[in-house]
Image (spheres, rainbow, N blue to C red):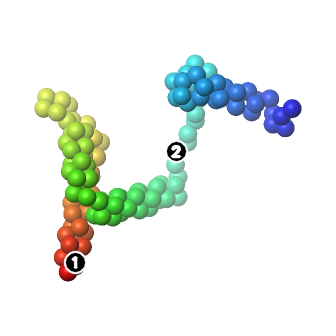
Amino acid sequence: MSIESPNVDAAHDRAIGRWENDGGSSAGLHQQQMQTVAGEIGDAEASNLRARLIALENLVVALLAGAPDGQSVLVREMAAYISPRPGATPHRLTVEAARNMLALVERAAHYKSLDRESEP
């Protein structure tokens, strides 16, 4: 006997069933008429997200600065991959994402060069 409500038990059983049937993917969720309603984020949440994004960007720069050069090459290749192909319609967000990726690599290169200068 479960101490949780029947609705919680049913949701749990559906989730376990999805996991067992298709590796946990949510491909069948639309068939269950489940909808997620997300309200607009407020100023506090937006500010928190900005701060977290800045922290993540700086963390990526630090990790790239300490990583082998091949890692920066891979990031550059990924940026080129998401950039629009000739004849394709450029999408503002992917163009900006590629530009940001390259900027992170350049920032990391700056710190990597500083670290190499300080070595004996």
Query: With respect to residue 114, does 22 lie above or below?
Result: above
Chain-order first, disc 1 or disc 2 = 2
Q: Residue 62 location, x and y as percent?
A: 33, 64
- Calculate the distance from the C-alpha at mark 1 to the C-alpha at mark 2: 50 Å
Q: Residue drawn 54% across and 28% down?
A: 23
Q: Residue drawn 44% across and 61% down?
A: 51
Element type at mark 2 = loop
**Looking at the rendering, in which quadrant would you find the C terminus?**
bottom left
Q: In the image, what residue type sits under mark 1?
A: Glu
**Tag shown at residue 119:** 1
Q: In the image, what residue type sits under mark 2?
A: Glu
Query: With respect to residue 14, does 41 lie above or below?
Result: below
* Residue 116 in which image quadrant: bottom left
Q: Nearer the viewer, residue 69 or 14?
A: 69
Q: Residue drawn 49% across and 59% down?
A: 48
Element type at mark 1 = loop
Query: With respect to residue 64, does 10 lie above or below?
Result: above
- Furthest toward the front, the residue is 120
Q: Residue 90 location, x and y as percent?
A: 21, 35
Q: Nearer the viewer, residue 101 or 22?
A: 22
**Looking at the rendering, in which quadrant would you find the N terminus?**
top right
Instruction: State how many labels appear.
Output: 2
- Furthest toward the top, the residue is 31
Q: Tell me if I can see residue 33 in this picture.
A: no
Q: Tell me if I can see residue 6 in this picture.
A: yes
* Residue 91 in which image quadrant: top left
Q: Residue 67 location, x and y as percent?
A: 29, 60
Query: How would you rate the neighbour count of disc 1 (Cα within 10 Å): few for under 14, some for 14-19, many for 20 or more?
Result: few
Residue under numbered circle 2: 40
Query: How would you rate the neighbour count of disc 2 (Cα within 10 Å): few for under 14, some for 14-19, many for 20 or more?
Result: few
Q: Residue drawn 58% across and 22% down?
A: 21
Discs 1/2, front: 1
